[in-house]
Image (cartoon, rainbow, N blue to C red):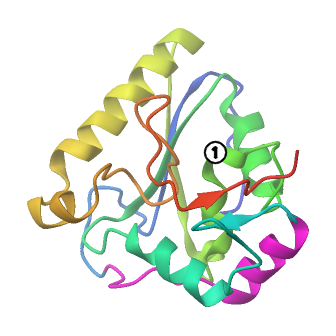
């Protein structure tokens, strides 16, 4: 992840392990979760709750995050933006545990390989179109997830995507994970 696109248009973007978002070769069998970042996240958010417990072991949290890693997928996050440049700037600046500017994809910030990820985006004529296209992209992603992973993960969406459709969270073990 690096330079911001020059467009202020609305659109949809994906964070990927590959320079080619359609290439699922050379993928990682496990998420590269940085336990020190997980610990810092938990330290910043004193109400952080894991499986009903405060102050859990960061290794346990990292293990659960890894359960949502899809080793045969290179897309790790899908999002929408009313202004692509601004939204990606928010993603780059986001601090793990903050509610804003981009808590929706903050699991990305737990990864060791964050600096090696790629951003792919497409512009849309309106913010409403971007919202529909994001839903389509997430539905298409879910539809092509291999049966093996769909059986294992109830809501098999990209690693850092927290919920889809809206109101249907991926997991319920990690709670109160952002500052109030």
**In the visual, does 42 lie left or right of 107?**
right
Which corner quadrant of the image does residue 60 belong to? bottom right
Disc 1: which residue: 104
Q: Local crowd at mark 1 within 10 Å, few (<14), some, or many (≥20)?
A: some
Quadrant of the image for the C terminus?
top right
Percent from the top left, x then y, of residue 49?
Answer: 70, 64
**In the visual, does 23 lie left or right of 163?**
left
Q: Is mark 1 on a helix, strand or loop?
A: helix
Percent from the top left, x then y, of residue 160?
Answer: 52, 57
**In the visual, does 65 lie left or right of 105?**
left
Percent from the top left, x then y, of residue 134?
Answer: 44, 29
Instruction: Decide which of 50, 31 is in the foreground and name it.
Output: 50
Which corner quadrant of the image does residue 140 belong to? top left
Extreme residue toward the front, this view: 52
Magenta span of residues: 27-44
For image coordinates 61% across by 22% down, the residue present is 10
Residue 4 seen in render: no
Magenta stretch holds residue 30: yes
For image coordinates 82% across by 43% down, the residue present is 100
For image coordinates 30% across by 53% down, the residue present is 156
């Amino acid at each position: 992840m690096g330079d911001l696109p020059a467009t202020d248009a609305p659109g949809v973007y994906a964070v990927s392990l590959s320079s080619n978002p359609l290439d699922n070769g050379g993928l990682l069998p496990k998420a590269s979760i940085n336990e020190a970042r997980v610990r810092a996240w938990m330290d910043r958010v004193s109400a952080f709750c894991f499986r009903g417990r405060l102050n859990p072991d960061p290794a346990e949290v990292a293990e659960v995050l890894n359960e949502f890693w899809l080793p045969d997928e290179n897309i790790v996050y899908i999002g929408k933006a009313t202004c692509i440049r601004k939204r990606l700037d928010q993603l780059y600046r986001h601090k793990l545990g903050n509610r804003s500017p981009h808590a929706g994809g903050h699991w990305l910030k737990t990864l060791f390989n964050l600096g090696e990820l790629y951003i792919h985006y497409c512009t849309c004529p309106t913010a409403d179109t971007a919202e529909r296209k994001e839903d389509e992209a997430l539905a298409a992603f879910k539809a092509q997830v291999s049966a093996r992973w769909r059986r294992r993960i109830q809501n098999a969406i990209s690693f850092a995507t927290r919920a889809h459709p809206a109101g249907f969270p991926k997991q319920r073990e990690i709670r109160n994970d952002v500052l109030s």
